[in-house]
Each structure stands twice: as C-alpha cells, then as structure tokens.
Amino acid sequence: MPKKPYSHKQVFFLAVIMFLIIAVGASIYWSPKKPTSSETYQISRDQYQQKFEGFWLGQNIANWTGLITEMDKVGTPETMPFYTDDDWGSKDQVAMWGEYVPHATHIDFYFQPQESPWGADDDTDIEYMYLYLHHSLKVTKLSPEQIRQGWLTHIYSEQDAPLYKKFANSVPQVENFLWESNQQARLLMEQGLLPPQTSEPENNPKYNMIDAQLTTEIFGLLAPGRPDIALDIAKLPIRTTAKYDAQWIAEFYVAMHSLAAVFDNQKSLKQQTQWLADQASTYLPKGSASKAVYQFVKDHYQNNPDKSDWESTRDAVYKRYQLNTNDGYQYNQPFDAVINFAASLVSLFYGEGDIVRTLKIGTLVGWDSDNPTATWGGLLGFMLGHQGVKNAFQIASISDTYWIHRTRRNFPDTTPERAGETNLKEMAKMAINVIDWMVIEPMGGTLSADNNYWIIDK
C-alpha cells in the first residue's frame, strides 16, 4: 500500500528539527572552540628545570668545543682543505686571523673541570643577559628601551672594555667580545637608536650575519610548546641585529627550541630532531634563500646512501653557495647567517639526534663552527636533560658554575663562595620563574593546584 503522506503539522515539526540540527552544528563549527583535555598539555616544572640545566651544560660543552676550530676552515680547500672525520683528535690548525685558541691544542671535546667555571662567550652570555632582564624586570616581553638599556648596562663598549690576554705571553688588548652585527648594534644604541632600527640595512650593514642565532634561541624554551608566543617575545631581540634571511634563520631556531618542549619521547631522537626541523622550516618564507638552503641540505642528506659521509654534503654546500650564487644567496663573509645555516643543518641531519656525533660534525664542518655546535648542544642538551648530557659523554664530573663577568658586566654574584657568578641550577631556576609568568600571560595557561605542573593550551 502507498505510504500515507505527512500531515502539515508533521512536516512543520520535521522542518523545525532539521533547522535546529543545522543551527547547532553550524554554531559548533563556526564558534571558537573551548580547549578540552586533548587540547592542553602538562609540563612538570621540576623536569623542565633539569632540562634547562641540560640546555646550559650542552651549550657550554658545544661552545667551547666548537671554538677550537672556529674559522679554521672558511671555504678555501685548495690552500686550506676542509676538516674531515679523520681530523678528530689531531692538532688544531690556525684560524683565518692567524691565531690559535688558548684553551685547547687538539680537536676534541672540551670539558671544563668541576673546580673552575664555564667562561661566558657570545654564544651564551647575551642569552643569559636576556633571561636576567626578563627576570629582574619581571616582564614577559622586553621593550625596545629595555633592550637598549640592557645592552648598554651589561655589554662593554670598545672604549670601556677591560684588557684581555689571550695567552700568557700575549700583548693585552681591549676586548668587548662582540661579533659582527652585535658590535654594530651596540654602536647604534650608543647613538640613541632602538631595535628594530639597529638591524635596518641602512643603519647596520652587518644585518645578514650570524649574530641573532647565538643570542635568541633561549626564547623558544621560555614559551614551551608555543612557537607563536616564542616568536613574538623573540621578535625584537632578533630584530636588534638581524633582518631578512638572518632574521628568519634565527626564528627557525627559536621555533625548534619551543617545540622541543613537547616532543614525543616515544620516538627516537633522530625522528624527533628531524620532525622539529621540518616543523620549524614552515616558518621560513617561501622563495627565501633560507628555505631553499634548508631543502637543499635535507635532500642531499636523504639522497646520500652513506649516512656517515657528511663531508660530501658539506662540500656540496661549499660549491653551491660559496663558489657559486644560487637560490638568491650571494656569499659575502664566513660569518654569513646563510652559509652557517647550511653548515648547521649538515651537523643536525647527519648527527641524527646523537649529541656526541652532532657536535663532532659541527666542530669539523667549517666556517663559524662554534655557533652551530652551541645551538645543537643547547637543544639536544635540553632534550636529554642535565644527567642525560653527562651520560652521553660518559663524564662523571664536570663544572656546573658560570663566569658571566668574563665577557659581560654588572650582574649579581649569586655564588660568592665559588668562582664565577652563578651556576647552571640557578640559571635554570631563573628560567622557571620567567616561564611561570609566561604560562599565565601571554600563553593563557595555569599552574596546577600543587604548583608542580604548567597546564598550557595548544
């Protein structure tokens, strides 16, 4: 029998039901979602402190190891052949400026003994300064004026810097331990300029150098799991010295450090470091030299059947980007951000998450070798934690104190009973306090009732 047609009342009722279903569905789809348990993550403050100690320890080991070969090999293989794995353990060679380092005679890992502090260097000291400024000023974001005042207060000029003797028989010289763009930015601040004007090309011709990489990675760790926040708070510190590719490369490192706070520890460090790099590479602008360099080095690594042969990728970088002009990059100096970004990626990919192997390659790869090693030493040190770094290098005893006044000035001495002004634990605690403020504002998270965890929205 044919079905009885719906009555007008039934048709109206069904239409109302359908309208309500569509309206509710649309409101759910279009309105902002409230975070649910799957959209938040918890981070142990105690564990993060251990990781931050690992960051400082790994960075110091890497910095002082990489300094041994800094500028030894700057892309002149005919007269100064590049280092290879076979050179590990051999006598250090003279740098491009005709000097050796004072702390080592051979190319090997450098471990500061427990009874003496790690000396500050430009790969760690300005990051320490920025952390101190956040902590002492109790701010989550530094203003241009606060950055300028911090630089003038804590960083020597070329006129008021103390005399420095590199060797016992050296002639003492004034040394303020500033690199290319950092030095120019400091001069501009003396003249009254503020960031970001201190990195504008018409003011600072060194804007495309490596400097921002070594001064800003820490901002990623101050915004765990939130690269958007990390890049926001790092924007002015990066733009203090860098623009264009140098800026974008620094942002790449900041993003990697931020995402490292929430990596999946069920996966290998090789998988994790490559995932972090791929995620951070999305922040490199399409069509930029830095984006093209990232893809070139990654592809060369992936297509190389011999994953121990990092030297072939380094040599390809030299030919493509130093001997020739490609991807919008024209080589200028061995301190260029772009050429060192390429070298840095060689050690990252071929190191495959192994801190020992990564730092060994970074030390041998060439150019400004202490900077990429310090970057990866800090990142991998954070991922491993303080004890994990010691385990990786199989060391039972190592320095845990830090001598900031080797290169900078006007910081309190928190460890008056010991050499140096502070220790890695105090440096990590300072960071934890700053992150407490970051989590609440601007990250919009909370502390757990027992204050043991940060609860952060993704």
Image (cartoon, rainbow, N blue to C red):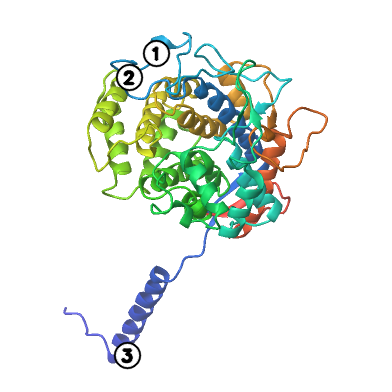
x and y percent of residue 33 in the render? 47, 65
| Residue bearing mark 1 | 85
Judge the density around disc 1: few (<14), some (14-19), many (≥20) Cα neighbours within 10 Å: some
Q: How far apart are marks 3 and 1 (CA)?
A: 85 Å
Quadrant position of the N terminus in the picture:
bottom left
The image shows residue 252, relative to residue 10, as above or below, that is: above
Q: What residue type is labelled 2?
A: Glu
What residue lies at 43% left-to-right and 24% top-to-bottom? 71
Q: Which amino acid does label 1 sit on?
A: Asp
In the foreground, 431 or 9: 431
Between disc 2 and disc 3, the foreground one is: 2
Between disc 3 and disc 1, the foreground one is: 1
Q: Distance between the residues labelled 1 and 2?
A: 8 Å
Q: What is the residue that sits farthest to the left in this orientation?
A: 2
Which dot marks residue 9?
A: 3
x and y percent of residue 230 in the render? 51, 51
| Residue bearing mark 2 | 311
Local secondary structure at mark 3: helix
